[in-house]
Image (tube, helix red, strand yellow):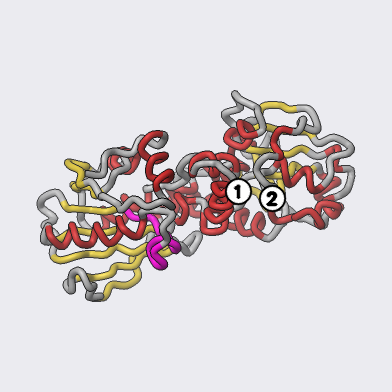
């Protein structure tokens, strides 16, 4: 179902976008095999059902399977399932226990025995879980058989493995520049905001052009993922606000550059899940452990759109303001030449000290000074 012509690529991305909407509404979605013919998995997001609605999925819960990511499987004591894990639910699995398996219960419930047989996932499993991640839902899905789909009144849309794998590239390909205006900032009055929109999911990203960057040379650039709590409200739990304001000042001092303000809250898991992760951190997990407990990878962000924005602005060589080597690798991978790095220091306090230490020691972040 995923083709090579522009029209086929748009159609594939639209199928994925419609499937995301259906998952968010608590409805079923068909994920087709790679050739879109031989095998189908019908899934529904556990998060959108909730404990009270589980009885409406067709009953006989013991005949259902739960799909969880490799990260969530590890939290359940299962290792070695890179494409995800299928857990067949037993006859006495309650709705509350199902939510616990999905990572939607308090940390500490994972030590209970699993309720049924465990088997490795396949490409459809991985693609379906990726679909849930794109929807910013907890990546835990119930597999429904045809009679369960019918009993629940669901009419699943279809998306293939290839459709879902190609979705991030399609989002970047169709990126649209919509508006540009002068916006003086306190740190530098000569600034313009250039707003881009992704037509498939309506995400809006902003290029903040500070001064007059010399496009003939390497341009100072900051890739900054949105952080409501840190950027807007000066939360003490992270260093995001400090890094954003520090980047504006550093670029102003360098006589020009660009900040890409990207709609990727919480390292790409969204605001709701970021706050869920915060709650888990209050129970003793660090920032990476909390994300993995919920079924997410250490970092769910994708910088394909950022590369498209830089190319649209005529920027091919950059000096990146970052402490994160993954950002440097991501730009280099899409042919944006990273020729240097400016570190961004952040103030350490009692609330973010563990977070900053985790980024250095476990996420491989580079020194900030």
Secondary structure of the residue carrying numbered label 1: helix
Q: Quadrant of residue 178?
A: bottom left
Q: Nearer the viewer, residue 127 or 67?
A: 67
Q: Quadrant of residue 75?
A: top right
**Residue 206 appears in the picture as rendered:** yes
Relative vertical location of residue 221 with respect to residue 365 in this rendering, above or below = below
Determine whether label 2 and label 1 are within 8 Å by CB.
yes
- What residue is rendered at 62% in x and 54% in y? 19
Question: Which residue lies under the disc numbered 1?
Answer: 132
Above or below, 62 relative to 50: above
Q: Is residue 107 left or right of residue 113?
A: left
Q: Position of residue 230 (x, y in %)?
A: 40, 60
Q: Which mark is residue 257?
A: none
Q: Which residues are magenta?
A: 223-234
Seen in the picture, residue 281 relative to 38 is either above or below; the reply is: below
Check disc 2 and report the residue beneath it: 45
Q: CA distance from mark 2 to mark 1?
A: 7 Å
């Amino acid at each position: 179902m995923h083709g090579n012509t522009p029209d086929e690529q748009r159609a594939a991305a639209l199928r994925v976008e419609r499937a995301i909407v259906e998952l968010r509404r608590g409805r079923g979605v068909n994920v087709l095999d790679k050739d879109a013919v031989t095998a189908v998995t019908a899934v529904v997001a556990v998060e959108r059902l909730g404990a009270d609605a589980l009885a409406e999925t067709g009953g006989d819960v013991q005949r259902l399977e739960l799909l969880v990511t490799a990260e969530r499987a590890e939290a359940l004591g299962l290792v070695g399932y890179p494409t995800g894990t299928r857990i067949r639910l037993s006859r006495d699995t309650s709705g509350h226990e199902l939510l616990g398996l999905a990572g939607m219960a308090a940390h500490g419930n994972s030590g209970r025995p699993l309720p049924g047989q465990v088997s490795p996932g396949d490409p459809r499993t991985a693609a379906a879980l990726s679909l849930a991640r794109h929807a910013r839902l907890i990546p835990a899905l119930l597999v429904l058989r045809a009679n369960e789909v019918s009993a629940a009144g669901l009419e699943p849309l279809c998306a293939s493995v290839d459709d879902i794998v190609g979705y991030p590239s399609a989002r970047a390909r169709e990126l649209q520049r919509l508006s540009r205006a002068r916006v003086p900032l306190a740190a530098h009055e000569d600034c313009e905001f250039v707003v881009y929109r992704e037509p498939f999911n309506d995400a809006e990203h902003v290029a903040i052009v500070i001064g007059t960057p010399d496009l003939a040379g390497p341009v100072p650039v900051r890739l900054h993922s949105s952080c409501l709590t840190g950027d807007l409200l000066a939360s003490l739990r992270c260093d995001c606000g400090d890094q954003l304001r520090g980047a504006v000042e550093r670029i102003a001092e360098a006589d020009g550059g660009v900040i890409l303000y990207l709609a990727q809250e919480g390292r790409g898991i969204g605001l709701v899940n970021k706050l869920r992760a915060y709650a888990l951190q209050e129970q003793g997990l660090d920032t990476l452990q909390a994300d993995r407990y919920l079924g997410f990878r250490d970092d769910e962000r994708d910088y394909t759109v950022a590369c498209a924005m830089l190319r649209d602005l005529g920027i091919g060589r950059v000096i990146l303001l970052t402490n994160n080597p993954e950002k440097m690798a991501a730009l280099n991978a899409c042919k944006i030449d990273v020729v240097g790095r400016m570190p961004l220091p952040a103030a350490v306090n009692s609330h973010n000290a563990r977070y900053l230490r985790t980024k250095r020691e476990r996420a491989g972040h580079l020194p900030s000074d």
